[in-house]
């Protein structure tokens, strides 16, 4: 039988949900972005323009991905020359969007929601 004290403890634990779930969210986002890069797609699922040779571009872009949870915040960024492709500053000026410029794409929303829901369910 659940007591009032048990319920109060669970509600108090939910106050730390963002901080507690951040590492799970970081893992889920990293997985989602790596899948997206492997598929050669933008965050919204559009195919990247092929290379001049007709190949899938940026096959190694996942190596430039950095994801970290600090407190209740998850940071996702690109490093090195791959970041220039995301910002249309690479040679040729072709933009191959890897990370969104604004907003949270649906595939990222789903990954975040699943990670937070798992943590929420575990706190019940």
Image: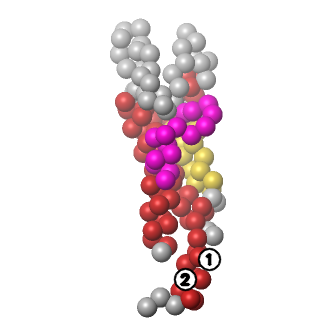
**Could you say where residue 103 lies in the image, as x and y percent from the top left?**
61, 37
Vertical relation: 40 (above or below) 31: above
**Is 47 placed above or below 118 here?**
above
Percent position (x, y) of residue 77? 58, 38
Task: Label 1, secondary structure: give it.
Answer: helix
Q: Nearer the viewer, mark 2 or mark 1?
A: 2
Q: At 42% across and 22% down in the image, what residue appears?
A: 47
Mark 2: secondary structure? helix
Point out residue 82 in the picture as x, y percentages from the top left corner.
53, 27
Where is the N terminus found, in terms of image quarters? bottom left
Q: Left or right: where does residue 41 sit relative to residue 81?
A: left
Q: Which residues are magenta?
A: 99-113
The answer to whether residue 56 is left or right of residue 101 is left
**Of 81 and 123, which appears nearest the observer?**
123
Q: Residue at x 48, y 28 (%)?
A: 42
Residue 112 lies in magenta, yes or no? yes
Q: Residue at x 55, y 18 (%)?
A: 95
Query: Coloring scheme of the render?
Result: secondary structure
Residue 2 shows in the view? yes
Q: Is residue 94 above or below residue 26?
A: above
**Which residue is disc 1 drawn over?**
12
122 versus 113 height, above or below: below
x, y percentage for residue 111?
A: 46, 48
| Gap in angstroms between the C-alphas marked 2 and 1 | 9 Å
Q: Nearer the viewer, residue 57 or 120?
A: 120
Residue 58 seen by the camera: no
Residue 7: assigned label: 2
Mark 1 Cα shell of 10 Å, populated few (<14), some (14-19), many (≥20): few
Taking the spot 63% from the left edge, 70% from the top edge, the residue there is: 15
Q: Earlier in the sequence, mark 2 or mark 1?
A: 2
């Amino acid at each position: 039988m659940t007591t009032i004290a048990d319920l109060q403890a669970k509600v108090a634990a939910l106050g730390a949900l963002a901080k507690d779930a951040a590492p799970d969210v970081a893992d889920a986002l990293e997985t989602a972005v790596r899948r997206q890069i492997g598929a050669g797609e933008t965050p919204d699922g559009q195919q990247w323009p092929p290379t001049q040779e007709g190949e899938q571009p940026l096959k190694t872009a996942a190596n430039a991905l950095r994801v970290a949870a600090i407190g209740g915040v998850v940071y996702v960024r690109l490093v090195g020359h791959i970041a220039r492709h995301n910002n249309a500053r690479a040679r040729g000026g072709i933009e191959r969007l890897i990370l969104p410029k604004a907003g949270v794409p649906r595939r990222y929303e789903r990954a975040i929601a699943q990670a937070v829901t798992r943590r929420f369910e575990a706190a019940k």
